[in-house]
Image (cartoon, rainbow, N blue to C red):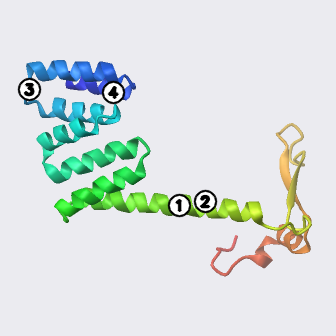
Amino acid sequence: LADWGYSLFLQGKLDEAEQALRLGLNESPNDQRLINNLALVLGHAGDYEESLALFRQVSGEAPAWVNLGYVYSSLGNGEKAAECFSKALSIDDQLESAAHALVQIAELRDEAEHRAARKKYLANKPSDGGGGVVQASKIDSPASAETSPVVVAHATRPAAQAVLTNPSAHRSPSAPAE
């Protein structure tokens, strides 16, 4: 029943998964997989307190907070996940899974902030009259008229045109030669 309940969970059938897992626990009240899977299902259903209590029953205090953190993370709540991972580390500062999870959350935050800043910059960047725009047009490949069109860039700036016509002349020192 542990696998059946987990399968239902993966299908997003939380109510059915909970029923199957509770049925299994009636038959095998100490089955660690049933308890852990039920904790997972309850967490995803929003019953975080019972989820944490069941995770504690299976793995202890600090790992229970890590597991709840993973639940929050899978639900897209990075803030609550980070709180759980931090709580786990406050209980056991050697718990690598919590430390790694916090690093991953920090990296994801940094990436999101970078994307947002770049998007804002590009949205607010003053136009230079189109001088930096490189337009693409389709032409047929001279190698075979029956192949799909090849995209060729037309630069509207002299520097861009120079790079397009002689890319090796403008290669950065760290780039490998062709």
Q: Quadrant of the N terminus?
A: top left
Alpha-carbon span between mark 2 and mark 1: 6 Å
Query: Which amino acid, by three-letter code, is at mark 1?
Result: Glu
Whichever of callouts 4 and 1 sits on the residue coming sooner in the sequence is 4
Residue 136 vs residue 19: left or right? right
In the rendered image, the vertical position of residue 101 relative to residue 30, given as above or below: below
Helix or strand or loop: what does disc 3 sit on? loop
Query: Which amino acid, by three-letter code, is at mark 2?
Result: Arg
Residue at (55, 62) in percent of width and height: 113
Q: List the residue tagged with mark 3.
A: 29
Q: How many marks?
A: 4
Q: Residues within 10 Å of mark 2 (few under 14, many from 20)?
A: few
Alpha-carbon span between mark 3 and mark 1: 44 Å
Whichever of callouts 3 and 1 sits on the residue coming sooner in the sequence is 3
In the rendered image, the vertical position of residue 91 relative to residue 144, given as above or below: below
Residue 115: give its label.
2
Q: List the residue tagged with mark 1.
A: 111
Q: Residues within 10 Å of mark 4 (few under 14, many from 20)?
A: many
Q: List the residue tagged with mark 4.
A: 9
Q: Tell me, yes or no, whether the two marked residues, 3 and 2, touch with CB atoms within 8 Å.
A: no
Residue at (83, 48) in percent of width and height: 150
